[in-house]
C-alpha cells in the first residue's frame, strides 16, 4: 500500500507523530519519511492528548437549585404523586423506621412508576451494594403481558419491596453453597429512589439491602443500618441524662473524595492502569509535587469541564456536592458534599464514584480512585467526617453555651475517644485492603497506627479532668462541672484549623475526621464499625453512671467520675505529634498500640472473641456473618495481589524487556564499531558502563520475575485463606514487587526514550 499523504510534521518525543487518517494508525519516522511499525500505543496516546479535543462535550451552566434532586423521588415529589395515606406511611417509615404495609406499598409503587414514566423511564432495578466493593443492579421492565396477551406497564408493591437476585454469584464467605442461589434485595425506604441515565436510557433505581435466603446480610447497607440504630438507641439513653426531649440521634457523615484524572488514551496505553487501577512501574519525573504548585491551584480547563458535568449529574441525583479543588499531587483532585445522615451519605458516595467514572468517558478521561495509583506522590483517601446530631437540633460533638450542654459535649467526646482506644484494632481492620496498604503511612496519609488527635485546647481540658484523680468532685466546682467551653470556641477552632494531617482519627472542631479510610472503599464498612464501637461504649457508660447514681451519687457527679475514668484508661490513644516520625512508632510500641501494616494481619481483629462479642451483643453481625466477611476480605486481598503480580510479569515480559533488549543491541553495535575503529577504551568507557548497567537490570528483571512466579505457584497451593494471604503478602508482594520495580524504573531512565513503550509519569500526570 502506498503511503498516505501526511500533514506537516508536529514533532513529539523522539521525532514521532501519528497520522490518524491512516487505517492502522502507524507511526512515521519524520527523519526518513519511511513507515515503521508502531512501538506501542504511547506515542499515539501522547499525540491524542495534544491534538484531539473535537469530541469533548459542552457543559452548560445551570442553577443548582433548579436541578437539585430532579431525578430523585424525594419527600417533596412523593407529596405530589402519592395519596395522603401512602405519603404519611412513607414519611413515617423514613423518619421513624416504621414498617410499610404491603397494601400501602402498592400505592407507593404506582406513584413512583407514574413519576418515573413521566421522565421517560422504562425499566427499574433494585440497586444494592454487595461485598464486591461496587454496586449491583438487575434491570426489569415495567412491561408485562396479561393472561389474554394484553401488553401493559406495571410496577406493584411486591416488586418495590423485594426482588430475588442470584446470591451465589456474589461474595458470601462460605455462607452459601454454589447450588444455594437464592438471595433477596429488600427496599430501604430511608434512601429515596432515583433515576440513573446511561446514554439515552433511563432506569429507576430502588436502594435496597441484600440478604441471603437464611437471613445473613451479604452487603454493606444492612449492617450499617443496624449499627446506626444501635447508636441511636445508646446515644438517646445518654442524651436523656441531660435532656429528656431528645428522642433520636443520627450519625452524620461528610466524606471527602480524592481522585486522579488522566487522559483516556494514556490510560489505555498502560495495561496496569486498565486492570489494576495503579501503575506497578514508573520512574519518578523530574517534577512531581515538590513545588506544591498544584494544591488549590487553577483547575485545568478540561478537568473543569468534566467536574461541572459530573456535578450536574450529581445534583440531579440529590448528591449535595459543595466543594471542588486541586489536591496536592499533580492530576489529583477532590470533591466534598454537605453533611448527610450516614446511610444516605454512603449511598451518595458510592453513587458518585459510578457517576464520575461514567461522565469521565464523555470527556475522554479516566478517573483513578485507587489509593496509590502513582508511587512517590500523594495517594488518595476518603476522609470520613463523622458527628452525631439530635432531633432537637444539637450537634453532640460541638461545645455548647451552657454548663449542661458542655458536659454533654464532653461526654460524647470522651466516649468516642474511649471507643477508638478499646477497639482500635477492629477500626484498623475496617479500612484494610490491598490498595490502602500502599497508601497508609506514605506521603501525608496517616500511618497504620490508630491514634486520636484532639488539639492543644481539648488536651488541656482532658488533662484538667484527669488531674482530679483521687479527689472528690464537688457539685459547685465550676472548673469541672461548668466547663465554659463556649468562651473558648474561637481558640478551639483556631487550634483545629491546622489539623494534624498524619493523624488517622482527628477531632476538627465539631466532628471527628477518620482520615485513614481509602479512596476506593465503601465507607459503609468503617462507618458500621465506628457506629458500633461508639454505641457499645455509650451503653457501658450509661450503665456505669446508673450504678453510681443507684449508690447515691448525684447525676452530674456520677457522669464526671465515669468521664474521668475513661480519660485515664484511654489516654494512650491520644497523640498530637508527627505520625510519620520514627519516634512515634517507638512510642506507640511502648504504649502497646497495634501497628498492623498489612491487610492479612490487620483482618485478624475481625474474628477475635472481642470482635464477635461486640458485634453479636449489638446485633450487627452474627458470628457466621463476621467469619464470612473475614474470608471475603482475605479472598479479595489474595486476588488483587495475584492480579498485580501477573500484570508485573506481563509488562516485564512483553514491554520492558523487549524495549531494553533493543537498546542493549544498539549499545552493543555502538561498542563493536568503536572497537573496530581501534579507539582507546577510555573514550567509550561511558558506553561500556551504560551497557553493563542495562544488562544488569535486564537480568535482574528476568530473575526476579521468574522467582516471583515460582512463589505464586507455592502460594496458590495453600488452602487456608489466611496463610495464603500472608504468603502472597510476604513471599510475593513484599519480596518482589519493589525489587522488580526498582530495576524496571532504572531501565526506564536508561533506555532510549523512543524505545520505551509505556507512557511515563511525566505524560500521565501532566498531559491533559
Image (spheres, helix red, strand yellow):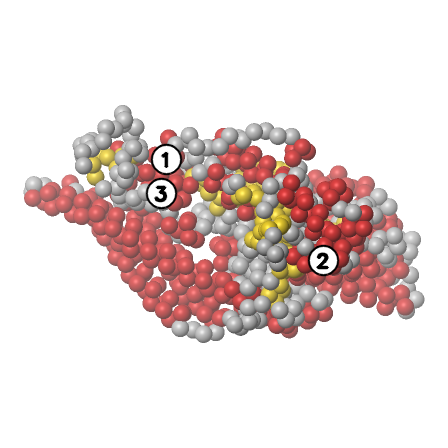
Residue identified by numbered label 3: 759
Nearer the observer, disc 3 or disc 2? 2
Task: Please say if 16 is above or below 176.
Answer: above
Q: Position of residue 576 (x, y in %)?
A: 64, 50
Residue at screen point 42% across, 30% down: 54
Q: Which mark is residue 48?
A: 1
Instruction: For marks 3 and 2, give the CA distance.
Output: 46 Å
Residue identified by numbered label 2: 228
- 3 or 2: tag closer to the N-terminus: 2
Whether residue 462 sits left or right of residue 211 in the image: it is: right
Q: Which mark is residue 132?
A: none
Instruction: For marks 1 and 2, give the CA distance.
Output: 49 Å
Q: Quadrant of residue 533?
A: bottom right
Residue at screen point 70% across, 49% down: 110
Q: Position of residue 63 (x, y in %)?
A: 65, 30
Q: So how many labels did they put on this image?
A: 3
Q: Secondary structure at mark 1?
A: helix
Q: Residues within 10 Å of mark 2 (few under 14, many from 20)?
A: many
Q: Please say if the residues under marks 1 and 3 sit with CB atoms less than 8 Å apart.
A: no
Q: Out of 496 and 581, give the one closest to the viewer.
A: 496
Amino acid at each position: 500500500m502506498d503511503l498516505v499523504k501526511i500533514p506537516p510534521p508536529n514533532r513529539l518525543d523522539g521525532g514521532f507523530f501519528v497520522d490518524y487518517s491512516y487505517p492502522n494508525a502507524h507511526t512515521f519516522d519524520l527523519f526518513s519519511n519511511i513507515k515503521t511499525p508502531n512501538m506501542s500505543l504511547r506515542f499515539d496516546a501522547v499525540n491524542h492528548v495534544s491534538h484531539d479535543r473535537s469530541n469533548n462535550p459542552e457543559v452548560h451552566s445551570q442553577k443548582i437549585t433548579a436541578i437539585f434532586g430532579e431525578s430523585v423521588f424525594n419527600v417533596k415529589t412523593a407529596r405530589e404523586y402519592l395519596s395522603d395515606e401512602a405519603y404519611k406511611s412513607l414519611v413515617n417509615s423514613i423518619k421513624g423506621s416504621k414498617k410499610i404495609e404491603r397494601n400501602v406499598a402498592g400505592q407507593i409503587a404506582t406513584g413512583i412508576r407514574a413519576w418515573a414514566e413521566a421522565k421517560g423511564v422504562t425499566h427499574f432495578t433494585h440497586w444494592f451494594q454487595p461485598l464486591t466493593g461496587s454496586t449491583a443492579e438487575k434491570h426489569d421492565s415495567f412491561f408485562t403481558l396479561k393472561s389474554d396477551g394484553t401488553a401493559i406497564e406495571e410496577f406493584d408493591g411486591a416488586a418495590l419491596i423485594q426482588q430475588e437476585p442470584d446470591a451465589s454469584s456474589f461474595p458470601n464467605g462460605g455462607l452459601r453453597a454454589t447450588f444455594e442461589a437464592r438471595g433477596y434485595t429488600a427496599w430501604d425506604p430511608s434512601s429515596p429512589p432515583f433515576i440513573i441515565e446511561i446514554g439515552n436510557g433511563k432506569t429507576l433505581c430502588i436502594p435496597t439491602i441484600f440478604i441471603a435466603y437464611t437471613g445473613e446480610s451479604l452487603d454493606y447497607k444492612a449492617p450499617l443500618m443496624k449499627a446506626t440504630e444501635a447508636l441511636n438507641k445508646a446515644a438517646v439513653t445518654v442524651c436523656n441524662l441531660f435532656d429528656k426531649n431528645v428522642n433520636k440521634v443520627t450519625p452524620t457523615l461528610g466524606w471527602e473524595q480524592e481522585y486522579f484524572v488522566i487522559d483516556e488514551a494514556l490510560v489505555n496505553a498502560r495495561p496496569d492502569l486498565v486492570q489494576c487501577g495503579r501503575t506497578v512501574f514508573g520512574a519518578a519525573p523530574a517534577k512531581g509535587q515538590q513545588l506544591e504548585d498544584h494544591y488549590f491551584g487553577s483547575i485545568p480547563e478540561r478537568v473543569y469541564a468534566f467536574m461541572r458535568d459530573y456535578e450536574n449529574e450529581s445534583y440531579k441525583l440529590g448528591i449535595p456536592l459543595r466543594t471542588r479543588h486541586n489536591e496536592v499531587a499533580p492530576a489529583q483532585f477532590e470533591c466534598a458534599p454537605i453533611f448527610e445522615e450516614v446511610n444516605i451519605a454512603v449511598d451518595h458516595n458510592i453513587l458518585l464514584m459510578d457517576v464520575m467514572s461514567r461522565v469521565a468517558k464523555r470527556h475522554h478521561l479516566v478517573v483513578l480512585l485507587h489509593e496509590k495509583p502513582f508511587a512517590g506522590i500523594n495517594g488518595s483517601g476518603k476522609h470520613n467526617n463523622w458527628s452525631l446530631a439530635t432531633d432537637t437540633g444539637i450537634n453532640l460533638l460541638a461545645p455548647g453555651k451552657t454548663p449542661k450542654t458542655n458536659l454533654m459535649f464532653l461526654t460524647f467526646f470522651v466516649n468516642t475517644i474511649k471507643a477508638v482506644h478499646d477497639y482500635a484494632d477492629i477500626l484498623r481492620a475496617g479500612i484494610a485492603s490491598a490498595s490502602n496498604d500502599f497508601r497508609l503511612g506514605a506521603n501525608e496519609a496517616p500511618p497504620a497506627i490508630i491514634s486520636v488527635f484532639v488539639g492543644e485546647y481539648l488536651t488541656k481540658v482532658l488533662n484538667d479532668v484527669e488531674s482530679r484523680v483521687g479527689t472528690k468532685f464537688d457539685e459547685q466546682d465550676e472548673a469541672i462541672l461548668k466547663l465554659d467551653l463556649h468562651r473558648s470556641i474561637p481558640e478551639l477552632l483556631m487550634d483545629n484549623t491546622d489539623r494534624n494531617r498524619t493523624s488517622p482519627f482527628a477531632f476538627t472542631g465539631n466532628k471527628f475526621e477518620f482520615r485513614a479510610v481509602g479512596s476506593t472503599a465503601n465507607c459503609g464498612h468503617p462507618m458500621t464499625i465506628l457506629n458500633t464501637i461508639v454505641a457499645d461504649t455509650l451503653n457501658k457508660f450509661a450503665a456505669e453512671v446508673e450504678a453510681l447514681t443507684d449508690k447515691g451519687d448525684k447525676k452530674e457527679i456520677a457522669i464526671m467520675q465515669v468521664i474521668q475514668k475513661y480519660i485515664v484508661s484511654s489516654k494512650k490513644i491520644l497523640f498530637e505529634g508527627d505520625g510519620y516520625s520514627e519516634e512515634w512508632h517507638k512510642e506507640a510500641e511502648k504504649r502497646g498500640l497495634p501497628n498492623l501494616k498489612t491487610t492479612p494481619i490487620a483482618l485478624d481483629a475481625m474474628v477475635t472473641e472481642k470482635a464477635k462479642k461486640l458485634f453479636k451483643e449489638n446485633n450487627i453481625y452474627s458470628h457466621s456473618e463476621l467469619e464470612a466477611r473475614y474470608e471475603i476480605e482475605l479472598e479479595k486481598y489474595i486476588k488483587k495481589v495475584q492480579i498485580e503480580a501477573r500484570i508485573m510479569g506481563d509488562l516485564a515480559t512483553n514491554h520492558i524487556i523487549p524495549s531494553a533488549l533493543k537498546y542493549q543491541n544498539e549499545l552493543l553495535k555502538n561498542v563493536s564499531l568503536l572497537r573496530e575503529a581501534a579507539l582507546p577504551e577510555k573514550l567509550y568507557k561511558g558506553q561500556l558502563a551504560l551497557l553493563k548497567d542495562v544488562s544488569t537490570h535486564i537480568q535482574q528483571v528476568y530473575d526476579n520475575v521468574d522467582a516471583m512466579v515460582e512463589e505464586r505457584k507455592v502460594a496458590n497451593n495453600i488452602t487456608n485463606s489466611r496463610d495464603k494471604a500472608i504468603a502472597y503478602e510476604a513471599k510475593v508482594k513484599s519480596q518482589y514487587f519493589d525489587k522488580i520495580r526498582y530495576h524496571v524504573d532504572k531501565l526506564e531512565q536508561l533506555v532510549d526514550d523512543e524505545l520505551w513503550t509505556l507512557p511515563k509519569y511525566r505524560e500521565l500526570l501532566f498531559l491533559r
